[in-house]
Structure formats: C-alpha cells, structure tokens
C-alpha cells in the first residue's frame, strides 16, 4: 500500500460491514471490504484505498470460535498499520455470553493490540440509534424505544436485548470494566472528561452519542486519543460517522461524494433468511409489486439433507426469472412464522441455512444471467455471500434514506459474478419498498 490507511475494521456480520463501507466511501474515504484475508495480489488491486474492511460472522459465533478466527483477523488487520482498527458490532448491540460475545471480542483485541483503553461508540443518529447516559435507544417505525423495550430487539430470537445500560450488558460478557463519557460531559469540558475516563483504570470508555454535536465531539476525542501503532476501538458504524467530521477538519477526506444512480434492471433475485417484521413488510410489498414469492423450508434448508429443497428453490426461481419476473425466496414471513427455535447452534445448522440460500442465489444469478441481487438478513448475508465466490466489495450507490443497506459492486475471479451489483440488508433496515427500489436502481 502506498499510503498509511486511516482505518481498518472487522465487521461482525456482512451487512454491518457494508454499513461501515457506505459511511466511509460516501464521504470520500476510499474503502474496500474483503470477504476473507486477501493475498498480496488482491490487496494490491486496492492500493489507493484509505480504509480496509474484513467481513466476518462473529455476531453469530461462540467465544471459542472467536479465540481462533477473530484473533487471526485482528493480527492481519494490525499488519495494515492503520491509525485505528475498529471491531464493528451491530448498532442494536445484541449479543450474549454464548453468542456474539462483544466483551470477549474486546478482550482479544486488547491482547493483539496491547493492553490499551478501548473506546466504544454505539450511537449513530444517521441510523436512528442513540446513547444517553450509557443507555441505548433505537427507532422502530418512526418511534424511539429503549433497547430493552424495543418491539423487535427485546425479542430477538437468538440474542434478545433485556438490558439498555451498555456497561451492565457488557459486564455479563467480560470482567473488563467500563467508564462513561456522557452527553453532559461532552457538551461541557469534553477533553477533561475524556482524559479522566481514560485515566480511571477502566479498560473500556463508552462515549454517548445522541445528536450531531455529541457525535462530532466523540469523533474528535477518538482521534485525539489514538495511540501510535494502532488504536483498537469497538462500536457500531457510529464510529465512522463520528470520525468523518474530524477527518474533514484535518483535510483527510475527499468530502461528500456524488453517485450516479445505476438505473433499473428487468429482473431481480432476492433471498431472505430474516424473521424481522421489517423484512416481512418488504417481502409483502415486493409480492404486491411484481415479484413472485417462493417460500423455503428453513428446517430442511438448514439440515444436512437439503439438496432437494435447494433444487426446488432454484427451479422455482429460474421459472419466474425466465418469465421475465423478479423473485424473492424467503424462509420466514415475520416473527410469527419463525422456526428458528428448532434450528440448533452446535451442529452448524444456522450457518447452513445462510450458506444454502447463497447456493440458491448463485444458481439464479448464473443461470438467468442476472446483474443485480439482494440478500436480506445480517447473519444470512454473511454466510450466503461466501457461496457466490465474491472476494471483495466496493460501494456502488449509498442509500441515504435507508443507510446501512447500500448497493455494492462484487469483485470476483468468477467472471459470472465479477461486476455484479449486490445489496445486503439487515433485518431491521430499509423502507417497505426496499426490494422494489433496488430493482429500480434509483432511490429518489
């Protein structure tokens, strides 16, 4: 690489990883997201980038998995010598001691980067996530909820959020303690409050972010307190949203970028493993607007004997596409049809669900010659995209009205996939017309 990057990051799922890429690239920070640690030749193709991401799956993994795979990822990210290395977590912070343990990830990061204070930023008003006095709030259908009272996240099928105080939530996952720089301190004497928090002897420093002014101040403190040799930081894409104004002041970014809309495609394929009510509305809207719907049995698809179900989904999808129609293949229509409780963690069933949706999508894309596709569901996206022979992603079109779900360009050694446009959407992300909007290729 010709210049030192500003930032490297590991995304705990794929949609979260593209969320970071969108936040950076749309503001003039050239960013590439790798699906696995690249070799020297692939890395050299993106030598002008100022931010390098590595998409992972740790949100749905155990602490034992993290110890091996996350440690290896952090070692590679450290080798890039970026000013900051960000462990990116979901903005709803859903995690548990057994699955997606954020505390354990921070412990591993501190071990790789040195026993340093780890700043933590979760609030991101751009995606309607807010932290105030250490408590997390998130929007749902135009209304803001404390995360432990959120209609969806408090009932998440795998990692329900039953605690809004992030320090308490983390204390269930790690013995590391957390200091807080709250909104009042950020609006008063932020430098002094930050210095005191860093000197408190606590390993984690949480910065509140509830509005543009506290976000800007949190970014200033994060950059001011960075360590020579690489600062490890944890948080949502709120980290990047906070840093960009500071980088702009320092003349380190290219400023807000303009992107030409790619325009419509005649057919679009969508696969969804999400059980979110948000995705349910999007699927129903799509079916009401020219998409064919194909329901896939999640229990069969996650089993070791899924070939017949995969073949059925491929045949149905190709039939719709051959007729000139778009298609959405889904494993659930909202939480009322969620059968996730019957799918285990220990035997890899949940991973197989996403992987097999990816196998279906690959056959639809290559069999019908599609140039654009969508994967819905954070965990689903992480495992599904790996089946499409994608090596890296770059930003094609940010979607300001639904941030965190951009249209990307796939880079691959497979000529049938290289250059394909793909959108990766978390369960809670997007307006009801999201799939139709991606097909139209024009967010206006």
Image (tube, helix red, strand yellow):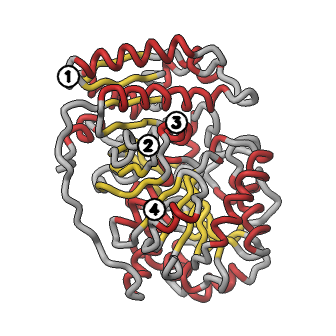
N-terminal label among 1 and 4 = 4
Kindly identify which residue carries mark 1: 324
Q: Mark 2 or mark 4, which is nearer the start of the sequence?
A: 4
Q: Secondary structure at mark 2?
A: loop
Q: How crowded is the residue under tag 3: few (<14 C-alpha within 10 Å), some, or many (20+)? A: some
Tell me if mark 2 has few (under 14), some (14-19) or many (20+) residues whose alpha carbon lies within 10 angstroms of its own: few
Residue depicted at 45% across the width and 65% down the height:
45
> What mark, if any, has residue 32 been given in the picture?
4
Q: CA distance from mark 1 to mark 3?
A: 25 Å
Q: Are marks 3 and 2 in contact (CB under 8 Å)?
A: no
Pinpoint residue 286: horizontal percent, then vertical percent: 27, 27
Residue 42 vertical placement versus 384 (above, below):
below
Spot occupied by residue 238 in the image (x, y as percentages of width and height): 48, 64
Q: Is residue 57 above or below residue 33?
A: above
- Which of the two discs, 3 and 4, labels the residue nearer the N terminus? 4
Q: Which tag, 1 or 2, sits closer to the chain's start?
A: 1
Element on which disc 1 rests: loop
The disc at residue 414 is 2
Q: Is residue 267 left or right of residue 229?
A: left
Which residue has dot 3 on it? Answer: 387
Q: Which of the two discs, 3 and 2, labels the residue nearer the N terminus?
A: 3
Pair 4/2: label in front: 2
Between 220 and 138, the one lying in front of the other is: 220
Disc 3 from disc 2: Cα separation: 12 Å
Q: CA distance from mark 1 to mark 4?
A: 33 Å
| Mark 1 or mark 3: whose residue is earlier in sequence | 1
* Mark 1 touches mark 4? (CB < 8 Å): no
Is residue 107 or residue 388 the one in the foreground? 388
Indicate which label's residue lies in the foreground, 3 or 2.
2
Q: Is residue 54 left or right of residue 139?
A: right
Check the image and report above or below for 19 versus 213.
above
């Amino acid at each position: 690489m010709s210049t030192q990057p500003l930032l490297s990051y590991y995304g705990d799922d794929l949609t979260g990883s593209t969320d970071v890429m969108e936040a950076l690239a749309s503001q003039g920070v050239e960013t590439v997201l790798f699906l696995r640690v690249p070799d020297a030749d692939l890395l050299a193709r993106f030598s002008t980038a100022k931010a390098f991401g590595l998409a992972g799956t740790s949100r749905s993994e155990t602490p034992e998995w993290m110890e091996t795979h996350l440690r290896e990822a952090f070692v590679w990210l450290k080798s890039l010598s970026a000013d900051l290395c960000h462990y990116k977590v979901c903005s709803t912070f859903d995690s548990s001691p057994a699955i997606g343990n954020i505390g354990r990830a921070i412990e591993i990061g501190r071990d790789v980067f040195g026993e340093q204070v780890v700043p933590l930023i979760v609030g991101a008003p751009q995606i309607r996530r807010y932290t105030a006095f250490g408590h997390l709030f998130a929007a749902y259908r135009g209304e803001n909820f404390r995360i432990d009272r959120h209609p969806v996240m408090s009932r998440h099928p795998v990692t329900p959020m039953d605690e809004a105080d992030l320090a308490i939530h983390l204390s269930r996952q790690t013995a590391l303690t957390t200091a807080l720089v709250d909104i009042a301190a950020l609006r008063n004497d932020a430098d002094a409050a930050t210095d005191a928090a860093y000197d408190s002897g606590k390993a984690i420093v949480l910065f509140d972010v509830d509005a543009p002014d506290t976000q800007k101040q949190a970014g200033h403190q994060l950059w001011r307190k960075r360590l020579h040799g690489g600062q490890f930081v944890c948080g949502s894409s709120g980290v990047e949203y906070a840093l960009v104004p500071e980088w702009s002041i320092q003349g380190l970014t290219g400023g807000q970028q303009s992107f030409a809309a790619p325009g419509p495609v005649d057919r679009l394929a969508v696969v969804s493993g999400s059980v979110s009510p948000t995705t349910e509305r999007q699927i129903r809207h799509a079916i009401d607007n020219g998409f064919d719907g194909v329901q896939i049995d999640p229990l069969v698809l996650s089993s070791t004997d899924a070939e017949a179900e995969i073949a059925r989904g491929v045949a149905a999808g190709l039939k719709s596409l051959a007729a000139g129609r778009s298609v959405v293949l889904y494993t659930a229509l909202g939480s009322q049809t969620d059968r996730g409780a019957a799918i285990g963690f220990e035997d890899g069933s949940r991973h197989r669900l996403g992987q097999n949706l990816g196998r279906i999508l690959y056959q639809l894309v290559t069999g019908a010659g599609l140039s654009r596709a969508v994967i819905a569901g954070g965990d689903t996206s992480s495992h599904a995209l790996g089946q499409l022979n994608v090596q890296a992603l770059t930003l094609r079109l940010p979607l300001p009205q639904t941030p965190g779900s951009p249209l990307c360009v796939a880079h691959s050694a497979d000529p049938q996939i290289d250059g394909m446009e793909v959108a990766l959407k978390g369960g809670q992300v997007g307006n009801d017309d999201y799939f139709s909007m991606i097909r139209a290729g024009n967010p206006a």
